[in-house]
Image (tube, rainbow, N blue to C red):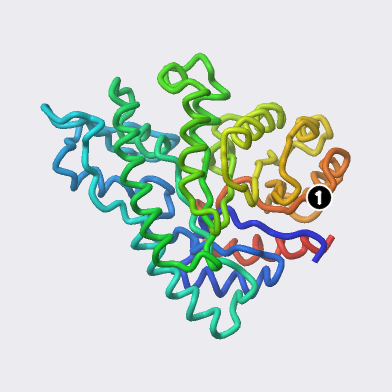
Amino acid sequence: MSKSVLLVGSIPLASAEDVFRAVAQHVGPAVKRVPDGETGERSGWTVWQDQVMAKSPDIERSGSRDLHGIAYPTYAPKPGVEPERMEFGELGYAKTAKDSYLVFSRLRSEGINSQARFQVSLPTPLAVVQAFFWGSAALPHIWKAYERQLLKELDEIARFIPARDLSIQWDIAVEFHRIWEKPESELARQFPTDKLIEAIARISDHVPTDIELGWHFCYGDAGHKHFVEPHDTTIMADIANRLIAATRRRLDWLHLPVPRERDDVAYFTGLAKMKLHKMTELYLGLIHLTDGLAGTKRRMAAADKVVFNYGIATECGFGRRVPETIPALLELHRAAAEI
């Protein structure tokens, strides 16, 4: 294989075992890390955290909102509850990671994905709380409470899964398409860039150094279209440099999206200013099923004018795809890796 493959996260098959088997069959040794697919109730990324909000004794329902075609209930702290001291209870990320790892480990003992680590993809705390507490003046305080619980679950994952088998990916999405690409927004006012850089560095440094760490830069996905299209890679390169400078531990990989129509060199020129460590793997999300291998080759040819050593991926997870399309999409990864 001339290029390695990154699977961003969600893969809408029936179970984690189905995902692990499909990846082994259709992608094979080109993939270094295998996610469990975020199947079932988790296929909508953060939507499944609704059950966490509904069960918390510190939170009450306040309404609902439409978020790019997905109905999100909204919540607020109950009267008398200090937002920063809210208790969310079990989020479910640790439990599902541990359950999926047991399946991954069993299949690996049979030779399935034996070359790969198990990848756990986690949303940044802001991604969850801004969806369910939209418009709340207390959002910065709620954010801290949710981060506290999410990091507890990360600790639980790290205790259960051997470090040599584990990779953690932080999905950095809302920060891009709702704040850094919209600096005039209310969310940007509540969460200035310096504060966000500090926060993402903090949760990254929380990952033990013997566990792999990756960042997935994301512009959202609705109908296989970004919520906001990146003009080029300039903002992403700048944020990557600032995060790397703020983070004490090693970054093992970075993933950036590439819109389907961007097969021009201008899109990639910002990457020339990105200061990745020589051991950090760069993945470009230039695979799109709609234009297949031909489109992938065009985008790769443009990227090759700026960067020479990168892996390949889709621009986002597969979560809202029809399951029947997944084998062909995985096969496209293998074909592109062999170019």
Of 315 and 223, nearer the camera is: 315
Image side of residue 78 versus residue 75, left or right: left
Q: Which residue ends up furthest to the top in the rendered image?
A: 184
Where residue 87 sits, quadrant-wise, is: top left
What is the x, y in percent for residue 198? 49, 31
Image side of residue 230 versus residue 161, left or right: right
Q: Which residue ends up furthest to the left in the rendered image?
A: 80
| Tag 1 secondary structure | loop
For the image, the number of numbered tags is: 1
What is the x, y in percent for residue 138? 28, 24
Q: Which residue is mark 1?
A: 309
* Residue beneath the point at 51% across and 44% down: 204
Image side of residue 161 versus residue 73, left or right: right
Of 266 and 113, nearer the camera is: 113
Where residue 130 sits, quadrant-wise, is: top left
Quadrant holding the C terminus: bottom right
Quadrant holding the N terminus: bottom right
Q: Which residue ends up furthest to the bottom in the rendered image?
A: 110
Image side of residue 43 versus residue 295, left or right: left
Of 16 and 280, nearer the camera is: 280
* Residue beneath the point at 82% across and 34% down: 264
Identify whether 215 is placed above or below 81. Answer: below
What is the x, y in percent for residue 173? 52, 37
Q: Amino acid at mark 1?
A: Asn
* Residue beneath the point at 41% across and 35% down: 126
* Residue beneath the point at 39% across and 40% down: 70
